[in-house]
Amino acid sequence: MKVLMSNRLKESSIEKVKDLGYEVALFDPKDLSTIDCSSEIIVESGLIKKMDLGKFNNLKYIFLTSTGVDYLDLDYIINERNITITNAHGTYGPPIAEWVLYNILQLEKLDRLNLENQRNKKWSPRKYSGQLYNKKALILGTGAIAKE
């Protein structure tokens, strides 16, 4: 089976796919004419919307390296072509949840003031340093970020 992958992916990821016994066809995202339409599997994200999936006569599976699918014609992919599609659901939950917590701490600890004082070589003690103890935060949602 031939897997179409962008040459912008990590070499280690490409090698793992090869190690599984797949033939890998690489393409240059800046030149979509380098796409091998005989591939049976596509590993990609946003560039897939620029590909003419009708040219892929053997396409059986699309693996999105992103979570969103709203930019794809799912009716065509799933119902008309019977192509299996999966996304990277849950991949970004932990890092984005950590990013949210990091920013909450930055705000509470006056991090921007600390950085400004550091740039100005001002080393005086602060009169206030907040803390999260006894405070509540709500991340509303049912997706991977809110679950984290």
Image (cartoon, rainbow, N blue to C red):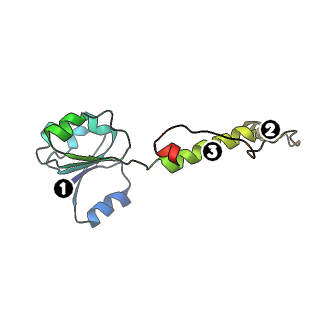
Which amino acid does the dot numbered 3 rest on?
Leu
Q: Which mark is residue 117?
A: 2
The amino acid type of the residue labelled 2 equals Asn
Answer yes or no: is residue 111 visible.
no
Which mark lies nearer to you, 3 or 1?
Answer: 3
Q: Is residue 124 above or below residue 11?
A: above
**According to the image, label 1 marks what residue?**
2
Is the C-beta separation of discs 3 and 1 under 8 Å?
no
Give the number of the mark in front: 1 or 2: 1
Please give left or right for residue 57 compared with residue 148 in the image.
left
Residue 114 versus residue 130: which sits nearer the camera?
Answer: 130
Residue picked out by circle 3: 101
Q: Secondary structure at mark 1?
A: strand
Q: Position of residue 5 (x, y in %)?
A: 28, 50
Which three-letter amino acid code belongs to the residue tagged 1?
A: Lys
Tell me the crowding category of disc 1: few under 14, some 14 to 19, or many 20 or more residues within 10 angstroms, Cα based: some
What distance separates the C-alpha of mark 3 from that of mark 1? 42 Å
* Mark closer to the chain start, 2 or 3: 3
